[in-house]
Amino acid sequence: QLSCLVKMVTLHGIPEDLDSYPKDLLLFLSPSDYAATGSCRQYFANLGKSNLDVLQRESSQRKQLLLEALACLKIPGTEVNEEDAEILGRLVCDLGGEYIRNSGGNLLKQLSQCDSFLPDQEEAIRSVISSGNTAFGPPVTWSAFTLNELSGLIPVFDHSIFQKIPK
C-alpha cells in the first residue's frame, strides 16, 4: 500500500511538502528522489523516525538504506557519534556488533527502540554496557530512571549485568 501511495504522491514529481507526509513513505523513496526537497541528512533524520519493520529486516532494501545513510553522513569506519546516531534513529537497529562496540554508548538510546537483535548485536550491547564507559555509567550506579531509559535493552542483559544493578 505504501509503495502504491508513493507512486500516486510522486506522479507529478516530488512534492515540496514531502516532510508533511507519513515518514513510512520515505522507505520507498531514495535519497536522490528526496534531494529536490531537502538534504540527504534531512531525509535520513525523517526516515529514522519511520517504522522500518515495514521492510523485512534482512531485505536488500533495508541494507541499501543503511549503506546510503552511512555514506550520506560520511561515517568512514565503524564508529558512530551521538549526533549521527540521532539522525540514523531506528536505522541503528541494522548496525552490526562492530559498530555497536566501536561507538561505545552512543547508540544505546536508539538501540533501546529496536524490536529484536541478532546474536552479534546482543553480545556487543552487553560488552558496551558491562564496560561502564557510557553516559549511563556502570550498572552499579544505575537508578530506576536509567533502567527506564534502557528498557528496550533489558532482554539482552545477562546475569552478570543484572547482579550489578542496585536493588
Image (cartoon, rainbow, N blue to C red):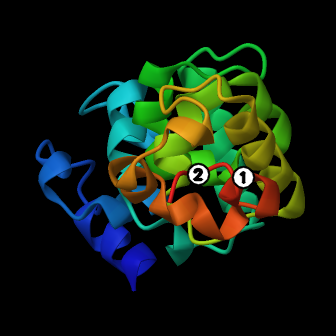
Is residue 30 visible in the rendered image? The answer is no
Q: Nearer the viewer, residue 164 or 88?
A: 164
Q: Position of residue 141 (x, y in %)?
A: 51, 36
Q: Nearer the viewer, residue 127 or 75?
A: 127
Q: Position of residue 22 (x, y in %)?
A: 23, 65
Q: Looking at the rendered structure, which numbered label has been put on residue 165?
A: 2
Residue drawn at (76%, 23%), measured in percent from left and top? 102
In which quadrant is the N terminus drawn?
bottom left
Q: Position of residue 31 (x, y in %)?
A: 47, 38
How many numbered discs sit on the rendered protein?
Answer: 2
Residue drawn at (64%, 43%), measured in percent from left and top? 66
Q: Looking at the rendered structure, which numbered label has been put on residue 147?
A: none
In this picture, residue 61 sits left or right of residue 15: right
Is residue 10 visible in the rendered image? The answer is yes
Image-quadrant location for residue 104: top right
In this picture, residue 129 sits left or right of residue 126: left
Residue drawn at (51%, 76%), measured in percent from left and top? 54
Q: Nearer the viewer, residue 16 or 20?
A: 20
Does dot 1 land on a helix, a strand or a loop?
helix
Name the residue beneath numbered marker 1.
161
**Kind of residue sitting beneath label 2:** Ile
Q: Position of residue 53 (x, y in %)?
A: 54, 73
Q: Nearer the viewer, residue 44 or 143?
A: 143
Q: From mark 1 to mark 2, how far is it between C-alphas?
A: 7 Å
70 relative to 112, above or below: above
**Kind of residue sitting beneath label 1:** Ile
As drawn, which residue projects farthest toward the bottom? 1
Residue drawn at (26%, 48%), measured in percent from left and top? 14
Q: Are the residues tagged 1 and 2 within 8 Å (C-beta)?
A: yes
